[in-house]
Image (spheres, rainbow, N blue to C red):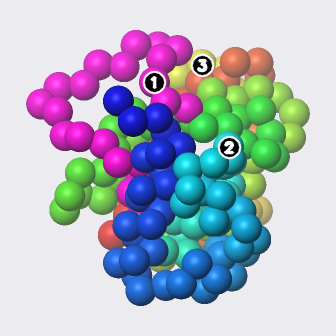
Amino acid sequence: MTNPNQMIAAAIQRERNRAGLSLSALAAAAGIAKSTLSQLENGAGNPSVETLWAIASALGVPFSFLFETQSQPTTLIRAGKGETIGSDQSDFIATLLAPCPPNVRRDVYRVVLQPGETRSSPGHPLGTLEHVILCAGALRTGPQGQEVDLHPGDYFSFPGDQPHSYQALASDTLAVLVMQAP
């Protein structure tokens, strides 16, 4: 199995080439240093979720496109297992559970959050919706200025193409997040 950094490197190069962007143009569009992007394309570094979201948004592709995966008829990911990505802003760990297959534009994540800093997003590509099901703990999430508090079993859907945030209100908050893009 290819390591995650190599998968991300190949995917960024592939999507950048499909978009017809130079390294400099993509770095500028994503708001990151050209040297950082170059390192990522070489399989070096340890990118945060914010960096990868910025790159995916600048490329106009779902986040999962930055992970090359093989399609399988069934997938089992045990709790606490799977490829994870963290945040530079807060104690936020997302595990990609079901990447977006061709011609279907949705990603499914298991997200574990801890109280502390809020995980903020400037928004994803136009038309993106986020669906959240809270499994454990307590969570404040939603578009900026329209956040709601969720409790176990609650479902909330909101426009992910607007600035929004996630804030754990209890330890070991666990949610399922479905990102749906047009």
Name the outermost residue toward the front: 42
Q: Estimate the x, y position of residue 20 in percent, counting from the top left.
A: 41, 86
Front-most of 173 and 124? Answer: 124
First-in-chain label (1 vs 2): 2
Do tag 2 and tag 3 residues touch (Cβ < 8 Å)? no
Left or right of 114: which side holds 50? left
Tell me, for residue 82, which label it has, or none: 1
Q: CA distance from mark 1 to mark 2?
A: 17 Å
Q: CA distance from mark 1 to mark 3?
A: 19 Å
Magenta segment range?
62-84
Amino acid at the residue labelled 2: Asn
On-image quarter of the C terminus: bottom left
What residue is shown at x 65% (from left), y 58% (from top)? 39
- Could you say whether the residue bearing mark 2 is in a helix, strand or loop? loop
Q: Main secondary structure of the magenta part?
A: loop
Amino acid at the residue labelled 3: Ala
Mark 1 nearby-residue class (10 Å; few <14, some 14–19, many ≥20): some
Q: Estimate the x, y position of residue 6 in percent, counting from the top left.
A: 47, 45
Residue 128, quarter of the rendered image = bottom left
First-in-chain label (2 vs 3): 2
Mark 2 nearby-residue class (10 Å; few <14, some 14–19, many ≥20): few
Q: Estimate the x, y position of residue 3 in percent, counting from the top left.
A: 46, 35
Residue at mark 2: 46
Residue at mark 3: 136
- Could you say whether the residue bearing mark 3 is in a helix, strand or loop? strand
Compared with 11, 91 (above or below) is above
Residue 87, quarter of the rendered image = top right
Amino acid at the residue labelled 1: Gly
Front-most of 69 and 143? Answer: 69
Name the outermost residue toward the left: 73
What residue is shown at x 79% (from left), y 45% (from top)? 88
